[in-house]
Image (cartoon, grey):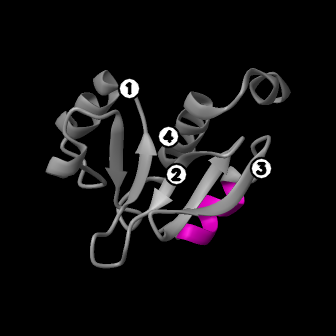
């Protein structure tokens, strides 16, 4: 079961990633732009950016690791339950989220 520390370890291996905060919670940013955020303990979940098509596919998959809330309706972000997600799939989603915010110079370094 991945934890926030595992998310940080993987993500900081990507170019130009730094630990930060967003909305008062731990976050990861690339070039000052947030691409991953750990919601509060009461809210739960890791927020990752994705395309709307991918979000719909993840939600339709029936996997309990993926969910959303009304706050994220119509927005390209998926909520990930770290206690239920496959680590390889989590890494793929983190990298995709990073790719959506990373500058071209960082993408070339990857």
| SS class, disc 4 | helix
Residue sitting at x 21%, y 39%: 59
Identify residue for label 3. Answer: 13
Residue sitting at x 81%, y 21%: 108
Identify residue for label 1. Answer: 51
Nearer to us in this view, 19 or 68:
19
Image marks 4 and 1: residues in contact by CB distance under 8 Å:
no
Q: Is label 4 or label 1 in front?
A: 1
Q: Earlier in the sequence, mark 2 or mark 4?
A: 2
1 lies left or right of 8: left
Image marks 4 and 3: residues in contact by CB distance under 8 Å:
no
Residue 45 on the magenta span: no
Point out residue 18 in the picture as x, y percentages from the top left corner: 73, 55
The residue stretch that appears in magenta: 4-10
State the quadrant of the C terminus. Answer: top right
Figure check: 82 above or below 109: below
Q: Which mark is residue 36?
A: 2
Inter-mark Cα distance, 3 to 1: 23 Å
Label 2 packing within 10 angstroms: few (<14), some (14-19), many (20+): many
- The prevailing secondary structure element of the residues shown in magenta is helix
Q: Is label 3 or label 1 in front?
A: 1
Inter-mark Cα distance, 4 to 1: 11 Å
Residue 72 in which image quadrant: top left
Label 4 packing within 10 angstroms: few (<14), some (14-19), many (20+): some
Q: Is label 2 or label 3 in front?
A: 2
Q: Earlier in the sequence, mark 4 or mark 3?
A: 3
Inter-mark Cα distance, 1 to 2: 14 Å
Q: Is label 2 or label 4 in front?
A: 2
| SS class, disc 2 | strand
5 lies left or right of 13: left
Q: Which mark is residue 93?
A: 4
């Amino acid at each position: 079961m991945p934890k926030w520390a595992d998310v940080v370890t993987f993500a900081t291996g990507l170019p130009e990633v730094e630990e930060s905060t967003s909305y008062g919670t731990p976050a990861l940013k690339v070039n000052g732009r947030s691409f991953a955020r750990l919601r509060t303990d009461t809210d739960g979940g890791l927020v990752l950016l994705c395309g709307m098509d991918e979000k719909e596919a993840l939600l339709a998959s029936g996997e309990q690791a993926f969910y959303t809330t009304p706050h994220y309706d119509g927005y390209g972000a998926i909520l990930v339950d770290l206690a239920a997600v496959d680590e390889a799939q989590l890494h793929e989603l983190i990298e995709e989220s990073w790719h959506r915010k990373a500058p071209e110079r960082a993408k070339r370094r990857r």
